[in-house]
Amino acid sequence: MKAGAKGTGSAGSKGKGGKVTKKFIINASQPASDKIFDVSAFEKFLNDKIKVDNRTGNLGDTIQISQVGSEGKIEVVAHTQFSGRYLKYLTKKFLKKQQLRDWLRVVSTSQGVYELRFFNVVNDEADDDDE
């Protein structure tokens, strides 16, 4: 009886027992094509700032960060528990550091995919006619 109960308990637990592989993509192709956003600097920032076991610079084999093609996409593959919100937080922190937070925002287009988009600016041409 004990062996059966033990087996069901470990199967029901989340995360710690088995390997969890999550894949996240950050699409910065729109600002990168306008030469506003430096993708390689962002990749280096993620390498420096992502924490594993409460330590920065401790990525090892658990988290891989790589550029996908030359169109401005970054792929983060995590073989441990990793939150997409943490990746969004770090992206916003990088934008603030580069003083791009006023023009760009981070939008989740689907699960595990984040995209950097420009804010929609509406120009009122009626205001220009008043002068």
Image: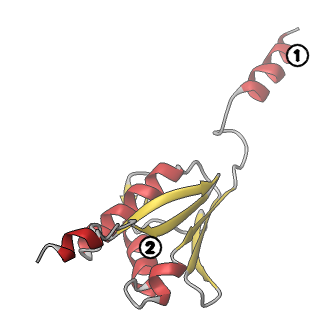
Tag 1 or tag 2, which sits nearer the N-term? 1
Do residues under tags 2 and 1 come within 8 Å of each other at their CB atoms? no
Above-or-below relation of 27 to 53: below
For mark 2, give the secondary structure: helix
Q: Residue furthest front?
A: 130
Q: Which residue is mark 2?
A: 47
Q: Residue at x 69, y 49 (%)?
A: 20
For mark 1, give the secondary structure: helix
- Taking depth in this image into account, of 101 and 61 the one nearest to the observer is 101
Query: Residue 78 falls in which quadrant of the image?
Result: bottom right
| Residue 53 in view here | yes
Q: Give the side of residue 96 with respect to residue 28, left or right.
A: left
Q: Whole-percent x and y of residue 101?
A: 29, 67
Q: Give the side of residue 57 with respect to residue 12, left or right.
A: left
The amino acid sitting under disc 1 is Gly
Colour scheme of the picture? secondary structure
Q: Residue at x 23, y 74 (%)?
A: 99
Q: Whole-percent x and y of residue 106?
A: 44, 61
- Taking depth in this image into account, of 88 and 120 the one nearest to the observer is 120
Q: Whole-percent x and y of residue 22?
A: 66, 55
C-alpha gap between disc 2 and disc 1: 43 Å
Number of residues whose C-alpha sits closer than 10 Å to that of mark 1, classed few (under 14), some (14–19) or many (20 or more): few
Q: Residue at x 82, y 20 (%)?
A: 8
Query: Residue 26 falls in which quadrant of the image?
Result: bottom right
Above-or-below relation of 63 to 80: below
Q: Residue at x 47, y 85 (%)?
A: 32
| Residue 56 in view here | no
The amino acid sitting under disc 2 is Asn
Q: Nearer the viewer, mark 2 or mark 1?
A: 2
Query: Residue 49 falls in which quadrant of the image?
Result: bottom left
The label on residue 4 is 1
The label on residue 124 is none
